[in-house]
Image: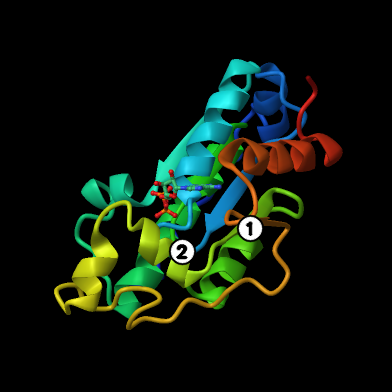
């Protein structure tokens, strides 16, 4: 993978700004809510419920889900460390475009490496990257096993599975910390909505 591009490729400044796009949607400011956590921790479930709530309140949202992105944009990538880094890098660039479009975007990727998440944070303006740690003990995730993946990983049928034979680096200072074994889904959603309201992302 190369990060070089031709010197003839110049960034175009557009007449309609990010802020104007956001305001046209009735948002105060766009942002990406970056959900991170083990497989089965509840990222997709909570992001999905949050998106539905925001949508009902009239906000313009988009949810980027790990499995869905791997069906298209990132279908050429696997699960070794190099591919995981590239997976997150591409998604980060996509979130930047969505934020530029003025949306409230949510991502649900394990994103196990602290350094990757830090890179995503640096890509975004201050306040536009919100790290949401879906903190669920491995034992609980394994018991839930919503996709039957842990049982396969334990049987050695899936290699490089986060939490089993691939590391998960928990956020040290997440913007939002959710413990799903202590709260039901609605309560988890409420914590995030409250954060958005307190941070003046939402106007309604
Ligand atoms: P991930 O996207 O992190 O891999 P999923 O959202 O696909 O995880 O799966 C989480 C599973 O845990 C779902 O079956 C969900 O119904 C269940 N679950 C139980 N309690 C909670 C909770 N408080 N928050 C989120 N998910 C929960």
Q: In this view, does 57 lie above or below 29?
A: above
Q: Quick one: 78 or 101, which is closer to the camera? A: 78
Residue pointed to by mark 1: 179
Q: Is mark 1 within 8 Å of ligand 1?
A: no
Q: Determine crowd level at label 2: few under 14, some 14-19, many 20+ residues with C-alpha closer than 10 A.
A: few
Judged left or right of residue 44, residue 79 is left
- Quarter of the image with the N terminus in it: bottom left
Distance of label 2 from label 1 (alpha carbons): 11 Å
Q: Can residue 187 be seen in this view?
A: yes
Q: Which mark is residue 48?
A: none
Label 2 element class: helix
Identified at 41% across, 57% down, the residue is: 40
**Percent of width and height locating residue 187:** 67, 40
**Res 24 → quadrant:** top right
**Percent of width and height locating residue 90:** 40, 57
Q: Quick one: 99 or 81, which is closer to the camera? A: 81
Q: Which colour scheme is used?
A: rainbow
Identified at 49% across, 50% down, the residue is: 43
Q: Quick one: 185 or 169, which is closer to the camera? A: 185
**Percent of width and height locating residue 5:** 40, 64
Q: Determine crowd level at label 1: few under 14, some 14-19, many 20+ residues with C-alpha closer than 10 A.
A: some
């Amino acid at each position: 993978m190369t990060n070089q591009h031709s010197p003839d490729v110049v960034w175009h400044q557009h007449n309609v700004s990010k802020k104007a796009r956001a305001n046209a949607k009735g948002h105060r400011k766009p942002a990406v809510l970056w959900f991170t956590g083990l497989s089965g921790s509840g990222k997709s479930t909570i992001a999905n419920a949050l998106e539905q709530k925001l949508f009902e309140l009239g906000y313009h949202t988009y949810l980027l889900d790990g499995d869905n992105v791997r069906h298209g944009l990132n279908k050429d990538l696997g699960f070794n460390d190099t591919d995981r880094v590239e997976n997150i890098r591409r998604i980060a660039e996509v979130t930047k475009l969505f934020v530029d479009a003025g949306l409230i975007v949510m991502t649900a990727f394990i994103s196990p490496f602290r350094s990757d998440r830090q890179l995503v944070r640096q890509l975004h303006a201050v306040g536009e990257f919100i790290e949401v740690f879906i903190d669920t003990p491995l034992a609980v995730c394994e018991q839930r096993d919503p996709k039957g993946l842990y049982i396969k990983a334990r049987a050695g049928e899936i290699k490089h599975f986060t939490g089993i034979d691939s590391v998960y680096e928990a956020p040290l200072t997440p913007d939002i910390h959710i413990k799903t074994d202590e709260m039901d889904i609605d309560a988890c959603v409420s914590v995030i909505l409250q954060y958005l309201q307190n941070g003046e992302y939402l106007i309604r």
